[in-house]
Image (spheres, rainbow, N blue to C red):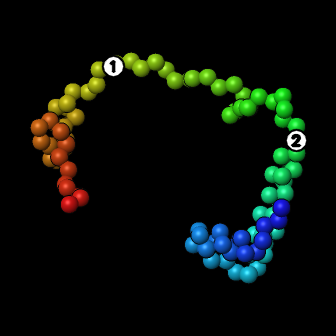
Amino acid sequence: MAISRSEVEHVAKLARLKFSQEEIEEFTVQLSKIIDYVNKLNELDTENVEPTAHIVPIHNVFREDEVKPSMDRDKILMNAPYKENGCFKVPKIIE
């Protein structure tokens, strides 16, 4: 299945991209080759192949959550230029 020049121009318009005539020709050829390759992959017999998301087995490598003491709030706010009710106070940026 070949990609037509008009399809490349249409996708470029949707993506708000401007290409020269030479670039459109080049992309038409390149995208057609990509589609042909994908179609060739569709010819493979995958009847007995299990669906996979990764080619190697992956397991959870995260550590367990542990509650740990944090820094003292007063110590953290000690160098804050503005604070209010035990929190950092920052300028309002949205009206």
Q: Looking at numbered disc 2 in the image, what kind of residue is underneath it?
A: Leu
Q: Position of residue 95 (x, y in %)?
A: 20, 60
Position of 42 with respect to 80 (left or right) is right
Which image quadrant for residue 85? top left
One can see residue 17 in this view? no
- Left or right for 18, reference 30: left
**Which corner quadrant holds the N terminus?**
bottom right
Instruction: Report helix, strand or loop for mark 1.
Output: loop
Amino acid carrying label 1: it is Lys
In this orientation, which residue lies closer to the viewer: 84 or 82? Answer: 84
- Whether residue 14 is situated above or below residue 50 in the rendered picture: below
Q: Is 9 rendered above or below residue 91?
A: below
Q: Which residue is mark 1?
A: 68
Q: Quadrant of residue 22?
A: bottom right
Is label 2 or label 1 in front? 2
Q: Position of residue 86 (x, y in %)?
A: 14, 35
| Residue displayed at 88% across by 37% down | 45
Disc 2 target residue: 44
Percent x, y for residue 12?
64, 71
Residues at badges 2 and 1 in contact (C-beta under 8 Å)? no
Q: Which residue is drawn at the image coordinates 68% and 34% (left, top)?
A: 53
What is the quadrant of residue 59 in the picture? top right
